[in-house]
């Protein structure tokens, strides 16, 4: 083994987690590369499905596509047929599902290799149905990460590795964990027991521990070159490919033997049900909604002035208070006794002076809570950059480099630039914690939007700063017009001055329950919702359709689909929930994606739904669709009955039934 070029520390990683497989893999690599058309796989076209998760290019350029692990292996492996290179290149730009890239190649002469490379783990959050199907169809799973991306590895370990383990559901699918890259310190150490780079890099011991939790094989690839790709990673991957093909060949032989037992009569083949329609989600636009609110300045209740009483900018108290305790003190949301942080109190007193008395003409407002607060900015440099600072706050308070660039354009003196930036950091300071410049900047860059959407939750369903009350089912629900206008176009039109609601503090709501309306408002404030049941999700979908909030509709649709798919057949048969009623409501409220999916769901579970009384409520068109796409088909059931009669007449034991 010393002649192969393996370092002692590298061998240690391989032998710790893969003592026998490594040697066997190296042996098979040599034999199959010299003879790709091995007679061991002399069947018709077989296939091996590999699913790769994670981004291993933490240390590489994002534009360097060939430096990815999967691309490099398929491009350099001797197992991949050269005649199939055009298919491989064409498949790299796989557009049907942008969450992953599909590669197809031919290996071992006549074996079809299909690889789904998912560099973003978001597929588990946005499309659990697709990610679960990918894992279910996989013969081999590869988990990749960069040894220099500690935060990404921690997410994989804490969040996504348990999801993969759950999806495997005790299946014996081999998993390969590939740690890619050389650790970024002066003397890279590959010893599993070394902790010299534990703070900034992922150590080998951490990777080995993750491999033990998943029952996986752990590999370290210091670079994506011929040695590490071809012999190190490729050897292990190809060993598992051979194991998968051997297992499939054995299963095929068993099926052939069973099919010949009953005097040569084969049972009818049950086709797979049609694939369910894929429901595409809608990306969040929470940050852009709040940012656009600053541009339109609708429902603004704060006016900033310079010390010479010139108007500088308008803003909204609810947004400012959601990101800063300084503004909470300024607008009397909290008292100094509540904060108990002298630096925050000092910043509020040094920078601003709030004045509710008439300094300049004020617009007419029917309610005192809508009276705009006039704030004088005491710091002239801070005042000159206030518009850029407000854009920074409204966009989520995480685009720090952009704010710094804009301030440098206005203030040529670097000392003044640093002074203004320090003021901003003091405004965004966390009470009770020492926030240095570096820590504050790091905190803001790593937690985008948390300063807005999670803090706005504090003002949900409270009278603090509320400027509108909804009357629903005999109760009142407080809200803030600025949030409603920013997040809902129907609400924006309602409060723009052309309707009676724009001048009313109390607004009635009809046709919606209080709980559903509260869930709707919670989504507007937090950009998330958690329905308690399918019926509540349908009610929330109807409310979202009424107020034209399309993303909330998609979330409710996805929740309904997920809940129905997770129901076992026995529960689906006994439940009192009417799927046909859900179909009716989805069609009536223009939820075309959900109604189409429900029709396929009824057809795919035909034997269950055809026995329910609600099945008779389907229209003629819907009934024809279900009969056409039903599973199992009527032809199969007929053939199955004939086969069973034949088996009983021959007094032969049926291995299928």
Image (cartoon, grey):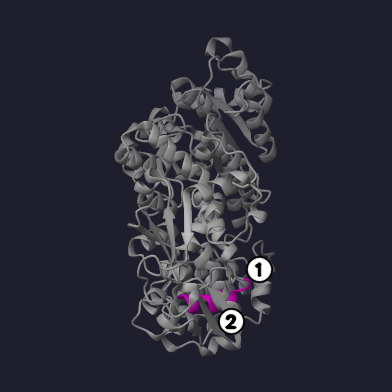
Rate crowding at label 2 as few (under 14), some (14 to 19) or many (20 or more) other CA atoms within 10 Å: some
Closer to the N terminus: mark 1 or mark 2? 2
- The boundaries of the magenta stretch are 532-544
Say what secondary structure mark 1 lies in.
Answer: loop
Q: Which of the two residues, 511 or 57, is positioned nearer the viewer here?
A: 511
- Residue 559 screen position, x and y as percent: 55, 67
- Magenta highlight on residue 541: yes
Residue 59 seen in render? yes
Q: Residue at x 34, y 47 (%)?
A: 384
The residue singled out by tag 1 in the image is 568
Q: Residue 492: image x %, image y %?
A: 39, 73
Place residue 574 in its image quadrant: bottom right
Q: Is residue 169 left or right of residue 117?
A: right
Identify the secondary structure beneath mark 2.
strand
The CA span between labels 1 and 2 is 41 Å
**Where the C terminus falls, by quadrant?**
bottom right
């Amino acid at each position: 083994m010393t002649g192969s070029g393996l370092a002692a520390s590298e061998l240690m990683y391989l032998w710790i987690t893969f003592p026998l497989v490594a040697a066997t893999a190296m042996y098979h690599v040599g034999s199959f590369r010299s003879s790709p058309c091995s007679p061991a796989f002399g069947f018709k076209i077989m296939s091996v499905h590999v699913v790769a998760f994670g981004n291993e290019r933490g240390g590489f350029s994002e534009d360097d596509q060939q430096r990815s692990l999967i691309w490099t292996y398929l491009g350099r492996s001797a197992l991949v047929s050269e005649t199939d290179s055009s298919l491989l290149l064409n498949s790299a730009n796989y557009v049907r599902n942008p969450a992953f890239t599909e590669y197809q190649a031919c290996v071992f002469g006549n074996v079809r290799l299909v690889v789904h490379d998912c560099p973003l783990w978001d597929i588990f959050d946005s499309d659990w149905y697709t990610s679960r199907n990918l894992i279910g169809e996989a013969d081999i799973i590869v988990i990749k990460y960069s040894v220099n991306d500690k935060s990404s590895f921690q997410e994989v370990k804490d969040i996504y590795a348990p999801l993969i383990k759950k999806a495997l559901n005790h299946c014996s699918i081999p998993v390969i964990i590939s740690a890619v890259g050389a650790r970024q310190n002066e003397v890279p150490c590959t010893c599993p027991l070394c902790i010299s780079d534990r703070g900034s890099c992922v150590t080998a011991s951490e990777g080995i521990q993750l491999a033990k939790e998943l029952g996986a094989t752990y590999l370290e690839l210091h670079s994506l070159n011929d040695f590490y790709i071809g012999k190190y990673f490729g050897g292990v991957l190809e060993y598992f490919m051979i194991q998968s093909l051997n297992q499939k060949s054995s299963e095929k032989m068993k099926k052939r033997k069973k099919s010949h037992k009953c005097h040569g009569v084969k049972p009818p083949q049950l086709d797979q049900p049609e694939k369910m329609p894929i429901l595409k989600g809608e990306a969040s636009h929470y940050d852009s909604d709040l940012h656009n609110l600053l541009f339109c300045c609708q429902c603004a209740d704060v006016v900033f002035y310079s010390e010479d009483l010139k108007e500088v900018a308008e803003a909204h108290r609810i947004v400012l208070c959601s990101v800063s305790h300084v503004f909470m003190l300024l607008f009397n949301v909290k008292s100094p006794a509540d904060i108990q942080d002298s630096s925050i109190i000092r910043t509020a007193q040094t920078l601003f002076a709030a004045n509710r008395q008439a300094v300049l003409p004020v617009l007419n407002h029917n309610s005192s809570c809508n009276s705009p607060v006039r704030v004088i900015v005491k710091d002239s440099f801070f005042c000159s950059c206030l518009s850029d600072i407000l854009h920074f706050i409204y966009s989520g308070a995480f685009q720090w480099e952009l704010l710094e660039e804009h301030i440098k354009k206005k203030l040529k003196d670097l000392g003044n630039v640093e002074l203004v930036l320090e003021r901003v950091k003091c405004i965004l300071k966390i009470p009770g914690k020492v926030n240095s410049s570096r820590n504050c900047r790091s905190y803001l860059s790593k937690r985008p939007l948390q300063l807005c959407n999670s803090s706005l939750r504090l003002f949900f369903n409270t009278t603090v700063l509320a400027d509108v009350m909804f009357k629903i089912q005999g109760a009142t629900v407080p809200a803030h017009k600025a949030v409603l206008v920013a997040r809902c176009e129907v609400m924006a039109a309602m409060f723009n001055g052309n309707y009676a609601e724009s001048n009313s503090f109390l607004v009635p709501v009809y046709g919606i329950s209080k709980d559903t309306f509260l869930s709707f408002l919670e989504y507007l404030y937090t950009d998330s919702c958690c329905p308690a049941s399918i019926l509540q999700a349908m009610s929330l979908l109807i409310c979202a359709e009424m107020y034209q909030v399309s993303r909330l509709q998609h979330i409710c649709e996805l929740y309904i689909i997920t809940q129905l798919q997770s129901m076992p057949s026995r529960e689906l048969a006994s439940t009192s929930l009417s799927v046909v009623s859900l179909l009716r409501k989805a069609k009536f409220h223009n939820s075309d994606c959900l109604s189409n999916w429900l029709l396929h769901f009824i057809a795919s579970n035909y034997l269950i739904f055809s026995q329910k009384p609600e099945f008779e409520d389907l229209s003629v068109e819907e009934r024809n669709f279900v009969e056409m796409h039903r599973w199992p088909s009527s032809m199969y059931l007929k053939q199955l009955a004939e086969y069973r009669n034949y088996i009983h007449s021959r007094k032969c034991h049926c291995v299928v039934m």
